[in-house]
Image (cartoon, rainbow, N blue to C red):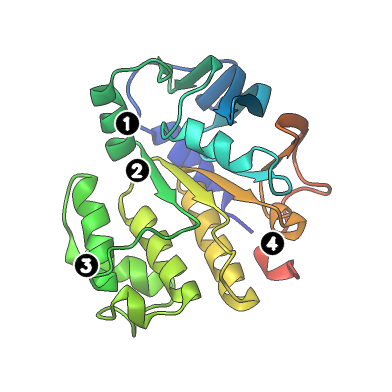
Amino acid sequence: MRNQKLRGAARAQEGDALGEAGTAGAGPGPHRDVIALDSVSRSYTVGGGTVTALTDVSLRIASGELVVILGPSGSGKSTLLNLIGALDVPTSGTITIAGRRIDGASRADLFRYRRESVSFVFQTFNLFPTLTALENVEFGAEVAGGRDRDRARRALVDVGLADRLHHFPGQLSGGEQQRVAIARALVTGNPILLADEPTGELDFHTGVQILGLLGEHAAAGRTVVVVTHNREIARAADRVVELSSGRVVADGPPPGGPTDVRELRW
């Protein structure tokens, strides 16, 4: 089980990594909301027509929460993640991070937000093919503000790649590349972690290991948002936000509360 005392202490001590702007809304319990979406919609023009990916989504996510965005392919999960991460902009509605609006923010402010406040785990890994696993993770730390080879090495050890530090992406399996991408996101120390299907390429044993690691980071105060179509993975979350056809159809804790990752089966 996650260490609830550790989580509470980390939330209480959370500093100004996301700014000193105060709360973004009336979030759960005494902990401030880090992420707030209000009536957010996103539409695209495709072939002369309009495709709506999200419709009127309102959502609050507090510091230290592990939240799963659950839904089938095409439900709007990745679009929602991209909006929170400022890789996309809403057609309407507002997105507030730690009390600061990011919809309509300047390019410089968005760049600073992505560098200092949010880390991504992409489905496509986005590794540099000419850099080793260790160098790819070091690069992530450097972009976020500080190159640290020892910290990068520890992150790779944590995801089970101690014997792959000096391998290039082309020498790694899909699951190993995914773990490098996860280590790169974790090593930044940024307070928000967004993960798009982080266990998609992993075997069950490694997937459980990674989910446990994400849970530890949430317990330490990071806000972790995981996109998945796997209902079993959602059982390990603090909250499950379910999407269908671009709308939130359910939002709450998993039935029976969060499950220890060691009890999951898929």
Residue 6 appears in view: no
Label 3 to label 2: alpha-carbon separation:
19 Å
The disc placed on residue 260 is 4
- Compared to residue 200, the image places residue 193 above or below, namely above
- Earlier-in-chain disc, 1 versus 2: 1
Quadrant of residue 53 within the rendered picture: top right
- Earlier-in-chain disc, 1 versus 4: 1
Task: Identify which residue is drawn at 51% across, 50% down.
Answer: 195
Mark 1: which secondary structure? Answer: helix
- Tag 3–tag 2 contact (CB < 8 Å): no
The disc placed on residue 190 is 2
The kind of residue tagged 3 is: Glu
**Quadrant including the C terminus:** bottom right
- What residue does disc 3 label? 135
- Tag 1–tag 2 contact (CB < 8 Å): no
Answer with left or right where residue 210 lies relative to residue 237.
Answer: left
- Compared to residue 2, the image places residue 192 above or below, namely above
- Earlier-in-chain disc, 4 versus 3: 3
Q: Residues within 10 Å of mark 3 (few under 14, many from 20)?
A: many
- What residue does disc 1 label? 113
Task: Identify which residue is drawn at 74% across, 54% down.
Answer: 235
**Residue 259's x, y, as percent?**
73, 57
Q: Residue furthest bottom?
A: 163
Mark 2: which secondary structure? Answer: loop
Task: Identify which residue is drawn at 61% across, 21% down.
Answer: 41
Label 1 to label 3: alpha-carbon separation:
23 Å
- Earlier-in-chain disc, 3 versus 2: 3
- Earlier-in-chain disc, 4 versus 2: 2
**Quadrant including the N terminus:** bottom right
